[in-house]
Image (cartoon, rainbow, N blue to C red):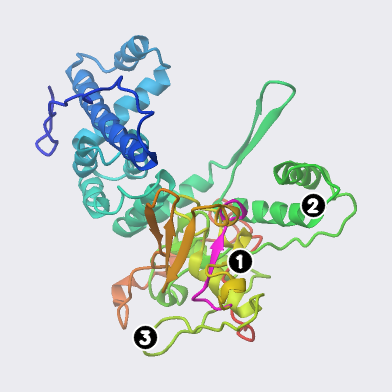
Amino acid sequence: MHLSADQPKPIVLTPLSSVSAPVGNLDRQGLLAEIVEARRHVNRWQARELAAIEAFAASAEGARGVAKELALELRMSERQAARQIALASALATRLPESFKAMFRGDLDPHRASKIAEPTAMLSDDLARKVDLLVADRICEKDAYAVRRCVNRVVANVDPNGYAKRSRERRRTRRVELRHEEDGMSSLRASLPAEVASSIYARVDRVARRLRGKRDHRTLDAIRADVFADLCLGDHKGRKVDPRAEVFIYLDFFTWLKLRDKPAEMAGHGQIPAWLARRIAKAPGSVVRRILTDPVSGHPIDSGRRRYRPRSSTDAFVRIRDRECRTPGCHRPAQVCDLDHVQAWARGGVTSTGNLCGLCSKDHRLKDEPGWHYEMSGDQLVITTPTGRQYRSAPEPLHDPVEDSPPRSLVPQDKSVPDPSNRDQDPAVPTATNPPDEGDQK
């Protein structure tokens, strides 16, 4: 078997002692433990399968027919087989820490692919560096969060390459039509992140505004109808606000062009510094800020003891949380409900320390029997009906910055995109962070 020096050697796996044994006699705790243990075994066997796939591909005299041969044997398409071979090769040669996590049972192939894909354009050395940096962060994250974490690290270890790839990807924007069954079709647009986010935010806001008690359409159906009407013409003569907020988080030195650290777009993830600055300075955008304590550096709590948060508190909580606080849910905080973690009726106060963003689905789940939510500082602790606890805390917006940035990080004028070039810097429909009341400049 072809194994690199860094790759863990395949281990002899002992199958579950009684795979066919009935599980009906287990309580809910036992069933959950059985599910987790079975998944760990599956992950380890899939790691062994990928190791065998990598060795099979490496032992072939010519690479041309490997994917086809594998596809025929596994009853899958040639494209699927090629993806399996690419993942196996990346794990075996470039991502040894991730492969070790799979052999331990801590990582599944789907989440492993969210590490392999963003690192595919890196050199072997940089890919291994990213793999090492994320090794302790990925096993407790869902696939979306894994990819976002890896993208953040990729942008930091290869900032110039990341910015270049972002510009190149913008040139591939397109619209695709796919016909489906039962008289339906899908329309897919591949667009720059800030454009797509703004389109969805506008469609969502109009749909929520139009939704009424007598309207039997689902919210998804209303969004689809609004999108179609906006594409085909005015939305039934109704006046629609063309502006939709998209939150952009960037550190102060990057804003002043003294750094070029990637920024973060709520609901999307990392974007290059040059793009974040262009969005924030676009005509019609609003740059807002949250005041922080000069000693601790923490945002100042502006809550009041009333049920509905005032606009400054509302804005602060959404900026702090960025997305639904339930682990695994990544709905942007702008479209989430603000929930009193300790219910208002039970003495909970309306302050940033007792408010968090939850999407409507998870907000309703909070009231189901057996679910308990508690806030400790910025950390939300969720206890499920089986007694398991899951913790959620907003990740830092960016790495801590030094008192003064190195002069070498000051970007040259030539790095600023040409606003007349649509491939580099298309028109930006909206912008960025909401401020406290009275902070707008």
* Picture layout, residue 102 above or below residue 338: above
Labels 3 and 1: the sequence-earlier one: 3
Residue 294 lies, with reference to residue 408, above or below; the image says: below
Amino acid type, label 3: Ser
Residue span colored magenta: 350-362
Front in this rendered view, residue 193 or 433? 433
Q: Foreground residue, 170 or 238?
A: 238
Quadrant housing residue 289 = bottom right
Direction from residue 159 to residue 8 in the image, left or right: left
Q: Amino acid at mark 2?
A: Arg
Q: Which quarter of the image is occupied by the N terminus?
A: top left
Q: Is residue 149 magenta?
A: no
Residue 357 belongs to the span the image colors magenta? yes
Q: Amino acid at mark 1?
A: Ala
- Residue 281: image x %, image y %? 58, 71
Quadrant where the C terminus is found in the figure: bottom right
Question: Foreground residue, 237 or 362?
Answer: 362
Is the residue marked by circle 2 packed among few (<14), some (14-19), or many (20+) residues within 10 Å?
Answer: some
| Mark seen at residue 211 | 2
**Residue 148 vertical position relative to residue 341 in the rendered view, above or below:** above
Residue sitting farthest toward the left? 5
How far is disc 3 from disc 1 in space, using C-alphas?
A: 28 Å
Q: Tags 3 and 1 in contact by the CB under 8 Å rule?
A: no
Residue named by callout 1 = 431
The percent position of residue 134, horizontal first and vertical second, equals: 27, 52
Looking at the image, residue 189 sits to the left or right of residue 392; the answer is right
Q: Residue furthest right?
A: 237
Callout 1 environment at 10 Å: few (<14), some (14 to 19), or many (20+)?
A: many
**Residue annotated with mark 3:** 296
Task: Report how far apart the C-alphas of labels 3 and 2 lie in the structure.
Answer: 44 Å
Number of the front mark, 2 or 1: 2
- Residue 72 lies in quadrant: top left
